[in-house]
Amino acid sequence: MTQRPRYPSVSRTLPLPVGSCSAMPGPGQAGVLPPPLLLLLLPLLAVRTLAAQPEAYVWPWPQKISVSPNVTFALKPILFRFQYSNSSAVQLGCSVLDQAFVRYLGIIFGPGPWLSRHHPGLKQTVKNSLEVFVNVPGCDQFPEMNSVENYTLTLSDQQFILKAHTVWGALRGCQEEIPFTRSYLGAYLLWLGETGLYNASDMILLKSLGLETFSQLIWRSAEGMFYVKQTEVVDFPRFPHRGLLLDTSRHYLPLQSILETLDGMAYNKFNVFHWHIVDDPSFPYESMTFPELSRKGSYNSATHIYTIGDVKKVIEYARMRGIRVISEFDTPGHTLSWGKGIPGLLTPCYSGSTPSGTFGPVNPILNSTYEFMASFFQEISSVFPDFYLHLGGDEVDFTCWRSNPDIKAFMKKRGFDRFEKLESFYIQKLLNIVSSYRKGYMVWQEVFDNNVKLNPDTVVHVWKERSPFPYALEMQNVTKAGFRALLSAPWYLNRISYGQDWQEIYMVDPLDFKGSPEQKSLVIGGEACMWGEYVDETNLTPRLWPRGGAVAERLWSSQSVRDLDLAYNRLAHFRCELLRRGIQAQPLYVGYCEHEYFHRMEQNHP
């Protein structure tokens, strides 16, 4: 007999914010139904529409938030604007924020039509602007591992203000409400006040964070007016690396799908796009130096490739949302598609004393292998601006190497008694090549497990749940050795099961292993992974969202934020908000969203 999923339990009924959903009431929970007037007006509304606004439905949950339920301000979309503070180090012409202002006005208010700017009898104070202040100049840089993402947001009678140390923090804060405080790493404050909205940012990254937060705090009444409550938020991420991996080799993902995923990442405050761009099945990256790689290694060299222009578009689109792009070109395994365009790169496999006609991993004993890798990664280092490259190093099948007489002779000459040593020989030479281009690198855990000599700034990516031992023990071993660790093992979102599997995902904690405070400080975060064996454009988005939000909150919010009932309430609402924004997120359980119902009406009644 199937167990009933858990329902959120609340002590009192809260109205839902704009874009919310109304889940089936749980024990002791009253349902919230829209009044008839709301039903008539909803087809005109382009934003979340509710009968009233709860204290806060913010995702991911801020480090600190205080809402005054009895103090509400009105916003008029025809008049409301974002504006730079006169004393801000960043002014008009900052592309990251200029574009974010336009983008978030559309997200918050929609395209209209809106009610008249004149509202006789309106009791709430009207706020017509959010002022933005950036403390540090500079808008053209890319986000980095150490970019500061804290911000403060204050919405009060005295001021509407968003402050951030970087433009990246400002982007995050527009998503929810936060109080005004002194900026510190990962923190932000939004304070909504009577005189207008003021966004202060020490840097552009913080501004990005602030805008997303602010957008989640606003709701629309049945009469078509926009409101926000007096709110103070101080926020910052718990971990600096909050990533999502997409596999574009097993199934090619069109460029638009990647861009839409970046939008969803920004809404969830993810800040790293891990692009697993090539693998055994196909090589869709169009190399300038070695064009035969995609001509012969892609599924279709005319339709299923990413040109340099496509790659640059992804990188810039991500930058505008405060997201880093880390490319992965995995070797020496997972390279069958490489061999089609580069003859001699892969190891010939043998059947007895004769070649079998099949190929295995990269051939590690040839000088030509390293000459190719030096040229190829020189190109990759110039195309992808992030300091880090992901070099893979996982799942190397030794069967082919074991069958090849030249490989065995080389190993004997070198004194290698295990194939792990041959793998380490290759990896070490590759790491030296990449380091010569002044790049850092990330590797899958096998590289560490096989005792390859690594630079101190190496990031070890833990992906195995139980082999050779539980991932918590692997995290312990990696950090004990002094390396930074990144967790993905429990967050493979391509794996699905019946029921609310987001709960298990949500309860994982990257620091849940035995180790000293110094060890745990080496955990830089984690990544949700969407591998492509059974995922393409048709099911990517609903499989990813809102389940990916469970990982996002675990990596952003305080370790103490673990209540599943409260999380269900907020995540169910956030799922509906994603629908309103055009992200076709799957439901958590029984219920409905206002937007999906009236979207259907619009189709039937043009």
Image (cartoon, rainbow, N blue to C red):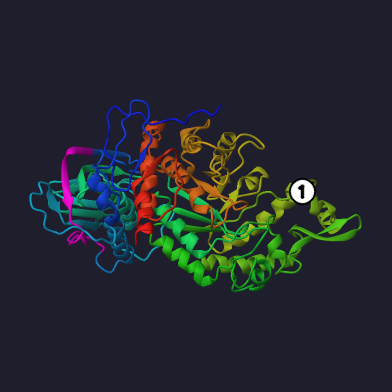
Q: Is residue 311 visible?
A: yes
**Residue 373 locus on image (x, y percent):** 65, 65
Give the extent of the magenta segment: 67-90
Total of numbered circles in the picture?
1
Q: Is residue 97 above or below residue 486?
A: below
- Residue 334 location in percent, x, y? 68, 56
**Where is residue 28 drawn, in percent x and y?**
33, 25
What is the quadrant of the C terminus in the image?
bottom left
What residue sits 31% from the left and 41% below the top? 57
When the figure is inspected, residue 326 is found, relative to residue 417, above or below; the finding is: below
Q: Is residue 89 magenta?
A: yes
Q: For residue 149, say whether it is visible.
A: no
- Farthest-out residue, right: 353
Residue closest to the eye, 219 or 422: 219
Say which quarter of the image contains residue 337.
bottom right
> What residue is drawn where x is 71% and y is 60%?
336
Q: Splitting the image into 4 quarters, where does residue 344 fall?
A: bottom right
Between 538 and 561, the one lying in front of the other is: 538
Q: Residue furthest front?
A: 605
The residue that mark 1 highlights is 419
- Quadrant where the N terminus lies? top right
Q: Which element carries disc 1, helix, strand or loop?
A: helix
Does residue 38 appear left or right of residue 501 in this picture?
A: left
Please tell me which residue is depicted at 54% across the width and 56% down the height of the picture.
Answer: 538
Q: Is residue 466 magenta?
A: no
Q: Quadrant of residue 70?
A: top left
User: Is 428 placed left or right of 401 in the picture?
Assistant: left
Q: Amino acid at mark 1?
A: Phe
Q: Residue at x 65, y 43 (%)?
A: 449
Give the percent coordinates (x, y) of residue 520.
Answer: 48, 37
Residue neighbourhood size for the residue with mark 1, other residues' Cα within 10 Å, grouped as few (<14), some (14–19), many (≥20): some
Who is closer to the viewer here, 134 or 517? 134
